[in-house]
Amino acid sequence: MGISVTVKVGCCGFQVSRKKYYEKLRLVEIQKTFYKPPKVETLRKWRGESPKDFEFTVKAWMAFTHDPKSRIWDKTGLPKEDSYGSLKPTKENFDLWEEFRTLVKELGANIVVFQSPPSFEFNEVNLTNAREFFSAISGDFLLTWEVREAGWFKSPEFRDLLEDLGISHVVDPMYEVPVYGKIRYYRLHGRKEGKKIVYSHKYGQEELEKLREIVEKWSLRENYVLFNNSYFSFENAIQFQEMVHST
């Protein structure tokens, strides 16, 4: 894949004890920040106990991406007000971002992963809001975005937004192809059965070989591969790391 290309492998969340995780992997996507961000002291502890060459990426708080009417909104601890969420360019969302960016910096992270729910459909209102929101917060970190509604993939306006703002498209590479990115950022969710995702899926050797081929085909200078397949993510991440680093 070339001397200048790097492939970084990790898990979405610490699937084992942090001590064991640090011994085997050098990348993790923090998940706790999605529901209700941990205290600064907690993140400072994680940064301090991790190896010097360890990299954290951070999943953005769902307070930015989800509708306050969502069934999981209560986990945010925020009021159910329309001025929050759905990537709206509101004072409320921007105030939350100022708090959140402090936490990201505490971890020394450079990448923030936004994940919109399937209910966040492609339409002019959502497209305009997303452009204004991301435009206002860009600059401190490398922003990545995972959309989960098919309409976005079919729209040239989606690619234009990503390219104009330097946002990298996050996909599950076993099912989707990124439309734009400064980096490649992949999240392996498991096996799809229609619209259902079976997270507790253990990737076999053939699937991991296929994944390696995909990563090589679409590789950029930096490539992130994060396993989010529940109980098997740690084992699969180690397997895949050995595969890509042995060639």
Image: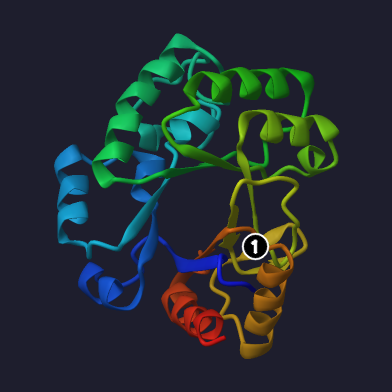
Q: Residue furthest front?
A: 3
Residue 1 in the image: state x and y as whole percent: 64, 74
In the image, is residue 95 above or below residue 38? above
Q: Residue furthest top?
A: 91
Task: Tell me which colouring the rendered structure shows.
Answer: rainbow
Closer-to-camera residue (70/113): 113
In the image, is residue 141 above or below residue 44? above
Residue 11 in which image quadrant: bottom left
Q: Is residue 123 left or right of residue 246?
A: right
Residue 28 in which image quadrant: bottom left
Q: Residue at x 71, y 45 (%)?
A: 180
In the image, is residue 104 above or below residue 161? below
The mark tally for this picture is: 1
In the image, is residue 85 above or below residue 180? above
Q: Is residue 80 left or right of residue 66?
A: left
> Element under label 1?
strand
Residue 76 in the image: state x and y as whole percent: 37, 33
Q: Residue at x 48, y 19 (%)?
A: 84
Please name the residue that numbered disc 1 is placed on: 197
User: In the rendered view of the protein, which quadrant contains the C terminus?
Assistant: bottom right
Q: Residue at x 26, y 77 (%)?
A: 23
Q: Is residue 142 left or right of residue 14?
A: right
Identity, as a three-letter code, of the amino acid under mark 1: Ile
Closer-to-camera residue (169/6): 6
Residue 216 in the image: state x and y as whole percent: 68, 71
Category of crowding for the residue at label 1, using alpha-carbon neighbours closer than 10 angstroms: few (below 14), some (14–19), many (at least 20): few
Q: Residue at x 52, y 66 (%)?
A: 6
Residue 194 in the image: state x and y as whole percent: 77, 62
